[in-house]
Amino acid sequence: MEKKCKKCNVVKDVSEFYKRKVSKDGFRNECKLCRKKYNEENKESLAKSNKAYKEANKEKAVKLRKIYKETNKGKIAKQRREYRKENLEKIAKDIKKWKELNKDEVIQYNKEYKETNKGKIAKQSKKYKEENRDKINEWTSKYIKAKRKTDSLWRLRIGVRSAVRRYLKDGKSKTTREIIGIDFKEFKDYLEVEYTEGMHLDHIVPLSWANNDEEVYILNHYSNFQIITAEENLDKKDFYCKLENLKKVLDNHNDLTKLNQIIERNSDKIK
């Protein structure tokens, strides 16, 4: 099937014309090339015209979108599922790029969301862990084995943290006493809260902020420990350090110069 363009007067195949439902033959009167040329020559006026039209028909457009969504829920959901399935890599790249360009907004949103949904997040996490315990244990085991082989700094973090936990229970390790800086009884008294089943021994300044072996030991000084509930630790993780708790660390730490270097490097994560 062919059609004559009313702009250039050349007879072309209909595939060279954009479709238009309201036309008798279902195609525009001008060919794609002529239409493209017209759009380029009238770019500014078309943009102004489109903007004015959208502003004048804003309410109408909102209503029409709402009606369309309500009457095509199943169709829209299916299209989204198919699109996501076919474009997983593209979507992941777009999300990563957007997060990098909007880093501050993402951090602020995450903070606000966690503050307003603490209970909900804790319940969801608990439910997921209960329903997927075997899967999580298997993944954790594989992850830890691989991490131990490839990351010496992480290996040191885990080793020291485990040693401090053991020390808090029995007070036997002399090496751990040298790391935290005080003896067993003083450590328990300093923490003020009894370390019992279900409670977590937590680093106030996250141990993940350490960039080398020396900083691991700096952050395992007794002043950087606190005992909190599992829910509090789940909320905090290694995302941030609370300013109200940081004061106690600064008041009691034995190497403020190096500690402050770590804190300054992560100042955006203190709240």
Image (tube, rainbow, N blue to C red):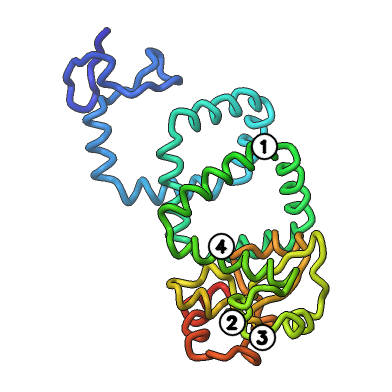
Residue type marked 4: Ile
Q: Are marks 2 and 4 in contact (CB under 8 Å)?
A: no
Which dot, 3 or 1, sits closer to the camera? 3
Name the residue that disc number 2 marks.
Answer: 178
The mark nearer the N terminus, 2 or 4, is: 4
Which quadrant of the view contains residue 31? Answer: top left
First in residue order: circle 2 vs circle 1: 1
Q: Are marks 4 and 3 in contact (CB under 8 Å)?
A: no
Q: Amino acid at mark 2?
A: Glu
* Front one among 181 and 73: 181
Q: Measure the C-alpha gap from mark 3 to mark 1.
A: 39 Å
Which is more foreground, mark 4 or mark 1?
4
Please state which of residues 171 and 62 is positioned toward the viewer in this rendering: 171
Q: CA distance from mark 4 to mark 1?
A: 22 Å
Indicate the quadrant containing the N terminus: top left, top right, bottom left or bottom right. top left
Q: Badge 1, how many Cα within 10 Å: few under 14, some, many 20+?
A: few
Q: Does residue 164 appear in the picture of this structure?
A: yes
Per the model, the C-alpha gap separating discs 2 and 3 is 7 Å
Residue at the spot of label 3: 182
Residue 231 image-quadrant placement: bottom right
Q: Is residue 271 visible?
A: no
* Image mark for residue 134: 1
Q: Which mark is residue 158?
A: 4
Which of these two is toward me, 235 or 98?
A: 235
Residue occupying image coordinates x 71% and y 68%: 201
Residue pictured at 72% horizontal, 80% vertical: 184
Query: Does 17 sit above or below residue 160?
Result: above
**Type of residue at label 3?**
Ile
Q: CA distance from mark 2 to mark 1?
A: 38 Å
Measured Cα–Cα span from mark 4 to mark 3: 20 Å
